[in-house]
Amino acid sequence: MKLSERLKDDPWLFRIASRAEGALDSAGPAERRKAINTEIVSLTYEKAEQIARAVVKPLPGKNRDLTLRLDDLLTSRWFGLPIMLLGLGLIFWMTIVGANVPGEYLSVALFWIGDQLSRLFQWAGAPDWLHGFLVEGVYRGMAWVVSVMLPPMAIFFPIFTLLEDAGYLPRVAFNMDRLFKAAGAHGKQALTMAMGFGCNAAAIVSTRIIESPRERMIAILTNNFVPCNGRWPILITLSILFVGGAVAAGWGTAASTAVVVGFVLIGVMVTLAVSWGLSRTMLKGIPSSFTLELPPYRRPQVGRTIIRSIHDRTLYVLWRAVRMAAPAGAITWLMANITVDGTSLLAMTAGWLDPFGRSLGMDGMILLAFILGLPANEIVLPILIMGYVSAGTMIELDSLAALKHLLVDQHGWTWVTALNVMLFSLLHYPCGTTLQVIYGETKSIKWTAVAALLPLSIAVGVTFTVNQLVQWMGWV
Amino acid sequence: MEYECCASAQPWVQFGVEHSDGPIIALAGNPNVGKTTIFNALTGMRQHTGNWPGKTVKQARGSYLYRSIRFTVVDLPGTFSLLSHSSDEQVARDFLVFGRPSATIIVVDATRLERNLNLALQVLEITDRAVVALNMIDEARNKMEIDVEQLQKELGVPVVPTVARRKKGLDKLMQTVYELTCEGLPTSPLRLTYPRHIEEAVQRVEPLLKEELPPWVNARWLALRLVEGDVSSLRSLARYAAPAEKGVTAL
């Protein structure tokens, strides 16, 4: 839009801007002026660098600053991004390997508590429905969430926080800046995106660091495309089940890690693509420049960081998940136990959704789990399992093998089903909390709706295409 | 009275600064360069804090006495630049451009000169009454040699090495501020020459801005903002420098 049009409300500014435009238009095409802001910024930087070089002489015999040497490598044009990906892979690998053992102990312990609760109810002579509702619905829902989510989060978050403390995250933004700029978005979006790996709702709040409303909106609308905590478990679990088991022994973890990194890459690519699309349609404009401080690297205070991140992030997110899981577990239990003509509400709804689910390479129960999981993504998998098992409650699955048996042998999952579930989970829509935060930040029902429906249509489009392609090629 | 030479009839109220008899000094700099340490060392206990009018940005101001003149120091938010548009940067920029401080102290971290000079250059585009406080010079001298004379020559404004934490160089800094505000110490701040297409555009816009604007507004600076299509600085122009004929008369 022309400058003068944006200043219409103030006659004096409008006059100044119109006169200036009159003078400028005779000077040449407006396109040439588009990049002037960037030119001015970079010229200022060049001059600052030039003066600093002329004035400062490093003392002989002193090593170059460690930060500078590290930055040469970590933010280099060629190695910056690959090193970043390797690091990301390493974090996932440690998470997958490390989460296995405590996860099993935890679920054993939590379900033991569940059994004791059942005994307590029996001893007190409580009615069956109350026991079912509270223990099999509410408690098991929470127990599932805790045992599935706590171990990976207790490993993933502290490592992530350590990197943050060491000063690596701004380098990530630096490396990604070019990509985001090319997509017409703001370089700081790389930071809010990274935050989204933890929690999309927190990331939406963090988009406040982007001052331009246009670029901020792009960051808000696309944040959903990186997997948050609630979605890591489904991605990690399914990749262990369907990829880890399919390759030679000993390589399972590596292969699962590669798949999870692959999904992150897909998420980032979708983020960039959608940002690009938005900045050319609904949110037109050119990216604004910004200054990013690359603070010196510091040795993180390991002990304190781990304690702080477990407290601030792990337990915070977990508590949220538990609060969401309790009512969702209750609703799911009700739906599974209220029957009409001998069929449970859960089965009826799933049956009704089934044709649509099948066209996306999934089934009705999976879609229903995604719908019921709207309040919190972390309960999608528990709801799904609960819907699948005939007992109508979230039974205890003592091992991944039992889960695989349930999915593959009893409900006919193939690698295509797993792939589509993972894709749908990655893309579908932000959770209820995130949508609430988006509304709080944008104060607009329209943009909140876009934030939900845009990803949903992409998720439906992608899974539909993948499924049709696979069927057509006869790969299954 | 001696200090009348450096008093100014600015409507400081617009910037949340109460009326002051003496000169107003702006304190600019990147975050974490010891700007606040310098502010505290200069003003001691004589400080007020509040918000910038209409912003959620914190404003700290204080004063000190030098040669029986009371200098009021306004601590601008620490920013990396004045070009992009966070509210911190906008506050700092607006005060420098439209608040007409009698002098500006630009605090730079001597150990990270290259990064800090970026802001210094942008401030020098706005004002010529500025002094650079080359802070943490002790730390810098352990690692490198800094040619202060050369830096002063390049920037065209006085450069005073300081160690704010140990209150070193502050006397010289206050003296330089005094010379700038009250004795008309001449400066010739570095102004960048931009590529030809930008300079040509500026040359077209600048004269017509001079017709419209009050004479104290830096027309070249504003012309550059117009050429790069920056709406926010024009909004600030209307807010702080609109002519009286618009119907708003100063009280």
Image (cartoon, coloured by chain):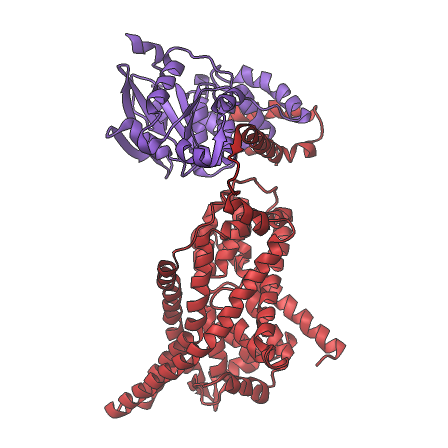
Q: Nearer the viewer, residue A31 or B153?
A: B153
Q: Residue at x 43, y 86 (%)?
A: A395
Q: Residue at x 41, y 72 (%)?
A: A150
Dividing the picture into quarters, in which one does residue A4 lie? top right
Q: Residue at x 60, y 25 (%)?
A: A18
Query: Is residue B9 rendered to the left or right of residue A364?
Result: left
Picture coordinates of residue A69, whole percent (x, y)? 55, 47
Whether B124 is drawn above or below A194: the answer is above
Query: Is residue B19 rendered to the left or right of residue A221?
Result: left
User: Where the N terminus of chain B falls, by quadrant?
Assistant: top left
Picture coordinates of residue A415, whole percent (x, y)? 63, 79
Colour applied to chain A: red
Chain the render paints purple: B
Residue lying at the far top of the rendered structure: B1
Picture coordinates of residue A168, whole percent (x, y)? 50, 52
Picture coordinates of residue A336, whole percent (x, y)? 45, 84
Whether B91 is drawn above or below A232: the answer is above
Q: Report whether residue A358 is seen.
A: no
Residue lying at the far right of the rendered structure: A473
